Image (cartoon, helix red, strand yellow):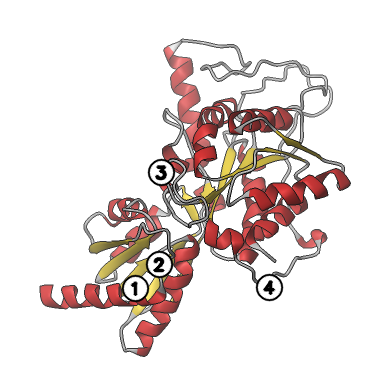
Amino acid sequence: MQGNEAVAEGALMAGARFFAGYPITPSTEIAEILAERLPKAGGFFIQMEDEIASMAAVIGASLAGLKSLTATSGPGFSLKQENLGFAVMAEVPCVVVNVQRFGPSTGIPTAPAQGDIMQARWGTHGDHPAIALCPSSVQESFTLTVQAFNLAERFRTPVVLLTDEVTGHLRERVVLPDPADITVVERKRPPAGLKDYMPYRAGEDGVPLLADFGSGYRFHVTGLVHDEGGAPSTKPEVAERLIRRLNDKIARHLDEILMSEGYLLEDAEVAVVACGAVARSAKRAVAEARQKGIKAGLFRPITVWPFPCQAVRELAGRVKALLVPEMNLGQLVLEVERAAAGRTKVSGFHKVSGELITPGEILREIGSVIEAVSEGA
């Protein structure tokens, strides 16, 4: 199965019943598959006039009660940012798949890159939370799509699946589980007959109940600062309470959100930190480094946002160096440096040629880092 196909299968198994999008390389296969499959599953597919309208349609469908998604790549992800911010502020659960490609602008539509890591966190303005998951295999493209929907529904927030051209077009064997064996989370809706429903009154977990439009509850949805009833407000205390709650409902539940993977880290002297397709090259490079007697390991953030700061901080406290290879000029490395906080040497290796970083290139950099550390000692 192809990575993009696995995303479509994951969305269907997670209960997605609405897709709005606009064709864009290298994500178009997701739309093509869902155009055929969603109507057969009782869902809806619509090709909108542009990426902005696509994101708006996804928000509307979600408010009407359907699990909804869109899929795009760099230029389209840029266009979605205003409405993505609206979804954050209005607390509308949805999934945005970004199959990253080479940029800026039109760039090279068929070439891989990881230039949208920071955009997935800070693409829309304001102090807002962000959840972004980064698969590095076709199997994970399936499982993390399901997880993206679960997190969106659980925390009433948009979630980004941050894949890339290599992972999206890679073909691998995939095991599709029995639907009965998959955990599928549904949003918390108000019980029937609730008299004082307030669409933005949070429960103990910081997440409000969300009624479907048309289910008998009338409420206002806005991108403005709003009170618990949804009415716009400019009161400082209302603004402060809202923005803090939006961020806290994610920050307080990192144990439910954060995912990462370690490989040969127990006795590692140098650890490679990589995500997405680059993590595949890094894993091979680490194995080859071990064959050469170099104690290397791999730490792979699966949840890129929120960033697994604590895990990286602990790792930095017990290795001699961290190496961060990525297909950009330095985005993930900034977070690694921040989390490491001077506990160890952090080096970046960056490639922006439109080609995947190879195991050989990472192995060479591992050697250089070990040499530099030895000379420093």
Q: Nearer the viewer, mark 2 or mark 4?
A: 2
Q: Are marks 3 and 2 in contact (CB under 8 Å)?
A: no
Question: On the rendered image, what quadrant is the C terminus found in?
Answer: bottom left
Crowding at dot 2, Cα within 10 Å, few <14 / some 14-19 / many 20+, comes out as many
| Mark 2 element type | loop
Amino acid type indicated by mark 1: Glu
Q: Are marks 3 and 4 in contact (CB under 8 Å)?
A: no
Direction from residue 223 to residue 287 in the image, left or right: left
Q: Are marks 2 and 1 in contact (CB under 8 Å)?
A: yes
| Mark 1 element type | helix
On screen, residue 327 above or below 50: below
Q: Counting residues from the N terminus, which is met first, the one under dot 4 or under dot 1?
A: 4
The residue depicted at 62 percent of the width and 59 percent of the height is: 141
Give percent across and percent down for residue 336. 33, 56
The residue depicted at 73 percent of the width and 49 percent of the height is: 32
Q: Which mark is residue 357?
A: 2
Q: Are marks 2 and 4 in contact (CB under 8 Å)?
A: no
Give percent across and percent down for residue 242. 50, 24
Q: Which residue is mark 1?
A: 361
Q: Which residue is mark 4?
A: 173
